[in-house]
Image: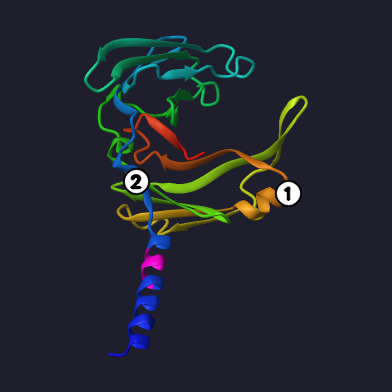
Amino acid sequence: MTFVTIVCFFCIFSMFVQSINLDQWIVERKMGKATIHILSIKKSTDNTFVHYTAIFRAPINTEMEESKKGFYWKSISEWEQGPMDSYTDTALYKASLTAPPSTYLIPPVWLTTESERFRMTYAPFATIEMQRDFKFNDCQFQVEKQESEASIKYKITVKTCDCRRRFTASVGKMTPTGFKKTAGLSSLYFFAVNLYPGFMIDDQISSIIINRTALIKDGVEIKSLQFLIEQDQDDFYNDLIYHSQFYYTLI
């Protein structure tokens, strides 16, 4: 083997190693379930109102967002923290809701943690009074990231989850009066793909590429980028959750 051959082999090997490094993904979140876990939902009715009580296990300092009073003006929501588990940094929470027994006056429940948001809407026509099994609790996902000067890539793998998947984004620029949104999930700055939609619950892949060059050229920045899992009611009478949305914050 000549010296030239050895040098050429070394060059080819170096290029191969570099290509592997360029393709490497950094795991930002290991495969696992959401930090918000639904333990139970109880429904009761009287002559005037319907009452829902949901028990969650979630990180300490989880908050419930208030619904718009103008639309849900007859509804009353209460949020109460229960016992804490210092080993897991979680606590039990009770979300109580009283509303008229109408299909459009039952406000959703919005929960927010440091990196997650969960929204669920109750099913007004469900006839069961107690539910303890929820398909949302089965969902697991992993987040991987790949970064270069020109782009940022995210890859999310979802397992054991019957759902729909998508991304949401807010892009804009700072002004004297604050942040001004100029675009959402625009193809100018994002390229998103959701593989195997609708017919798989394991190894579902969602990926998104962020065009850094275009952002810099237009003088805008990403205010937020979230990965969204959506689920619908399976049983019209025996599922107390009509619709749920889970948001994981990437940026």
Between circles 1 and 2, the one closer to the viewer is 1
* Residue at image coords 37%, 81%: 7
Residue 36, how many percent across, how many down?
Answer: 34, 28
Residue 18 falls within the magenta-colored stretch: yes
State whether the magenta stretch is mostly helix, strand or loop.
helix
Mark 1: which secondary structure? Answer: helix
Q: Which mark is residue 218?
A: 1
Do residues under tags 1 and 2 come within 8 Å of each other at their CB atoms?
no
Return the residue at label 2: 142
Left or right? Give the position of 181 relative to 32. Answer: right
The reply, left or right, for residue 110 in relation to residue 127 is: right
Q: Quadrant of the N terminus?
A: bottom left
Task: Tell me the kind of residue under disc 1.
Answer: Asp
Secondary structure beneath dot 2 equals strand
Q: Residues within 10 Å of mark 2 (few under 14, many from 20)?
A: some
Question: What residue lies at 24% left-to-right and 16% top-to-bottom?
Answer: 86
Viewer-proximal residue, 80 or 190? 190
- The amino acid marked with disc number 2 is Gln
The segment highlighted magenta reads: 16-20
Q: Is residue 92 magenta?
A: no
- Report the colour scheme: rainbow
Q: Position of residue 169 (x, y in %)?
A: 58, 42
Label 1, label 2: how far apart the Cα atoms are: 31 Å
